[in-house]
Structures are given as C-alpha cells and as structure tokens.
Image (spheres, helix red, strand yellow):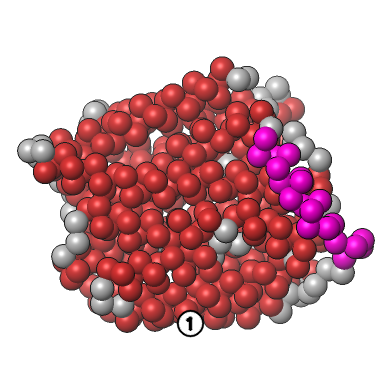
C-alpha cells in the first residue's frame, strides 16, 4: 500500500468516528429526554460534556503531539473514547451518561489535530492542503452518517446497541492508527519551557484575538447546533418530525462535505484570480449569518438554508490556515490547538446555555416556539458582533 494511504486512511477513519460521536446526541435526543426525563438544560449539559472535555485538553494536546507524535497520542486517546462509548451504552443516570460523554470527548480530542500533525511530518506543504481538506471531508461523512441513516437505525436497534457498536469501532480505530509508521524525529524535542513560551506567544498575540471571537461564536455555534440543538429546534420551532429534522442534518452534513471538497480543489484557482482565503472567510461568514437570520425569522424554504450553514462551516475552517500564516511554522501545532480550544469553549457554552435559556423562557411563560426563537436570535446577535470585530481588525 502507498505510504500516503497507510497514513491517511487510519487517521481519516479516526476523524470519521470522532465526528459521528460529536453529532449522535442530536438524533437520539428524543429517546434520552423520554427515558431520563431530563430538561432542555440537562440535555444541553449532558451533550456538551463532550465539548467541555474536548476543549479542556486542546492546549496540553498541542504540547503532547509535538513531543510524542500523533500515532501514540491519538491511538491512546481513542481507547478512552471506546471506554466512554461502552459506559454510555450501559448508563442509567444523567451523571453516568455525562461522565461517559466527557470520556468520549477526551478520547476523540486529537483526531483532527493529530491528522494535521502526521501530514506535516510525512508530506510536503504542497500536499498538506489537499490532505487536510480530505480529512475534513471524512468528518463530513461522519456527520452525514449521524443524521438520516442513524435515525433509521435507532428504532430498529435502540441507542444503547448503537453505542456498543461504537465502542468496538473505537478499538478498531485505535489499532489502525497505532499500526501506522512512525516518523523518527530529526532533532531533539524542544524543551517544555520553550514549548510553553511559544504557546504564550500565540495566546498573547493580536492576530490570535482577531480570529478567536468569530471562531468561538460562529463556528462554535454551528457545532452546538449540529451536535444537539438543530433537531429540537426543527421539531419545536418548525414542527417537523424527527425523521424530517434528521434530513435537515443530512443536508447540513452534505453542505459541509461539499464545502471541504470545494476548498481542497478550489482555493488555489480562486487565489490565482485574486480571491484569497481571507476574502472567502469574510464573505462566507457574512452569508452564513444571513442564512441564520432567515432561519430565525422563518423566512423562505428551510432546506437550502440549513444546507448553506454546512457550507459556511467549511469556509470558517480557513481561519486555521490564515492564523497559522502569522506565526513561525514550528508553532503550527500550538496555533491550531489554541484556536480549536476557543471553538470548543464556544460550542460548550452555547450548547449548554441554549438549553438553559430555553428552559428559563418557558418557565417565564413563553411558548416553546417563542422560547427557541428568542434563544436562537440572541445567539445571532452575538455572532454578528464577532463578525464585525473580525472586519474591523482587517
């Protein structure tokens, strides 16, 4: 097998697994609500435990990837993800399921960043862009699978059986990644003090804080919706069935996949015509906010709008490459994980806060439809403010 396939395929399988697990609770939310009798806020906290654990380890993860390499780090963490899936399959209380969800988040926290690191070790810069986009496309396939196909499987097999299968899949993914070849280090590892100094440099920079608010609120908000609140929104606000709502998730995933493939093959030709990644990011985020505005006010057909949100998410990931260009290549791992931390902090806070605000508004006498609309509208206001900040700093 070609070297790039021996490296790419196992890491792609790991990221597919990661993205499926990120979104699975959106489809099984009705079952969790019915079986556990939890509120919207409890459901948001349960699901966002994944994001909290995922985000909390991003900074030390960047240090570990640079010191120990992607093969060892990701394979070890995926064993934790498999254990989390097994615990989720047998959990009976909110606490047990939240702990299991946190273990899953911790276990898959390296899947994307380890892939980027491995490609950087083995391949030249001319191939990294296409390989990075291909990995993101594998995540898009995971999002597609955790939509309509999963909604078909749940009534047949039950959500607990699905998580048993996922536990086995996690073990297989760990074995596959551990079997990839190891790249010997060309130089001695950077001292920990030097690594920490480089991380501090990233976090203190104006360049980082130009991108961070937009990534936190817009990309983090997309993850919060895709991972949980899209289906409850579509059922409670738009009055759709679970199957129809899952179909909208399928459209989001399709848009995301199409966007990643478009970036892989279209960025270079567009740049040659004067349309650089920065311009794509600026206008892509603006179009995403317009689509969100139309969704919040229920204007126009919903399916194209949710498809557009998936496309916008793929454009938002250009921020990683753009921000990395402001730093030395040796800091690439720390730059990526620092921005990833902000994305997942946003996703956690939005996923939990969305449910808490919906509950508070309903307790204050608002109908469910109005409570969801006001909550989503408040998020949109914050997202617009972060986009304007990004434009002002340009």
Label 1 sits on a secondary structure element that is helix
Q: Is residue 94 visible?
A: yes
Residue 148 screen position, x and y as percent:
33, 60
Left or right of 156, for residue 199: right
Please tell me whether residue 232 belongs to the stretch shown in magenta.
no
Q: Residue at x 45, y 43 (%)?
A: 346
Q: Quadrant of residue 180?
A: bottom right
Q: At which x and y percent is residue 358?
A: 21, 43
Judge whether 371 appears above or below 70 on screen.
Answer: above
Question: Going by the picture, which residue comes out furthest to the top?
Answer: 392
Q: Which residue is mark 1?
A: 168
Position of the N terminus, as image quadrant, is bottom right
- Residue 69 place in picture, x, y as percent: 75, 66
Residue 192 belongs to the span the image colors magenta: yes
Secondary structure mostly taken by the magenta-highlighted segment of the chain: helix
Instruction: Look at 62% across and 75% down and name the residue there.
Output: 76
Segment colored magenta: 185-204
């Amino acid at each position: 097998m070609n070297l790039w396939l021996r490296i790419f395929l196992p890491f792609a399988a790991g990221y597919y697994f990661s993205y499926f697990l990120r979104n699975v609770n959106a489809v099984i939310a009705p079952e969790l609500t019915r079986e556990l009798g939890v509120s919207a806020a409890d459901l948001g906290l349960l699901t966002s435990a994944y994001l909290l654990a995922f985000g909390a380890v991003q900074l030390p993860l960047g240090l570990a990837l640079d010191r120990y390499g992607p093969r060892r780090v990701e394979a070890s963490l995926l064993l934790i993800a498999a254990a989390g899936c097994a615990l989720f399959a047998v959990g009976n209380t909110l606490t047990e399921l939240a702990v299991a969800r946190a273990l899953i988040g911790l276990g898959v926290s390296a899947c994307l960043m380890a892939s980027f690191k491995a490609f950087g070790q083995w391949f030249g810069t001319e191939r990294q862009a296409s390989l990075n986009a291909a990995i993101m496309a594998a995540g898009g396939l995971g999002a597609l699978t955790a939509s309509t196909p999963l909604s078909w499987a749940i009534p047949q097999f039950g959500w607990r059986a699905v998580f048993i299968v996922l536990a086995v899949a996690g073990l297989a993914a760990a074995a596959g990644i551990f079997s990839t070849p190891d790249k010997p280090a060309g130089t001695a590892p950077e001292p920990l003090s030097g690594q920490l100094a480089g991380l501090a440099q990233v976090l203190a920079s104006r360049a980082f804080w130009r991108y961070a608010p937009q990534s936190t609120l817009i990309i983090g908000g997309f993850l919060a919706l895709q991972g949980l609140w899209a289906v409850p929104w579509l059922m409670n606000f738009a009055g759709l069935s679970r199957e129809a709502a899952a179909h909208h998730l399928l459209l989001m995933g399709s848009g995301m996949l199409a966007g990643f493939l478009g970036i892989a093959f279209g960025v270079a030709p567009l740049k040659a015509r004067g349309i650089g990644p920065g311009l794509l990011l600026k206008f892509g985020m603006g179009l995403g906010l317009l689509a969100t505005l139309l969704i919040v006010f229920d204007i126009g057909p919903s399916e194209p709008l949710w498809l557009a949100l998936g496309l916008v998410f793929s454009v938002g990931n250009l921020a990683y490459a753009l921000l990395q260009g402001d730093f030395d290549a040796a800091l690439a791992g720390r730059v990526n994980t620092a921005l990833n931390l902000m994305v997942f902090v946003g996703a956690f806070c939005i996923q939990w806060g969305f449910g808490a605000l919906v509950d508070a508004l309903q307790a204050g006498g608002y109908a469910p439809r109005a409570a969801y609309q006001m909550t989503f509208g408040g998020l949109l206001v914050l997202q617009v403010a972060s986009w304007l900040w990004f434009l002002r700093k340009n």
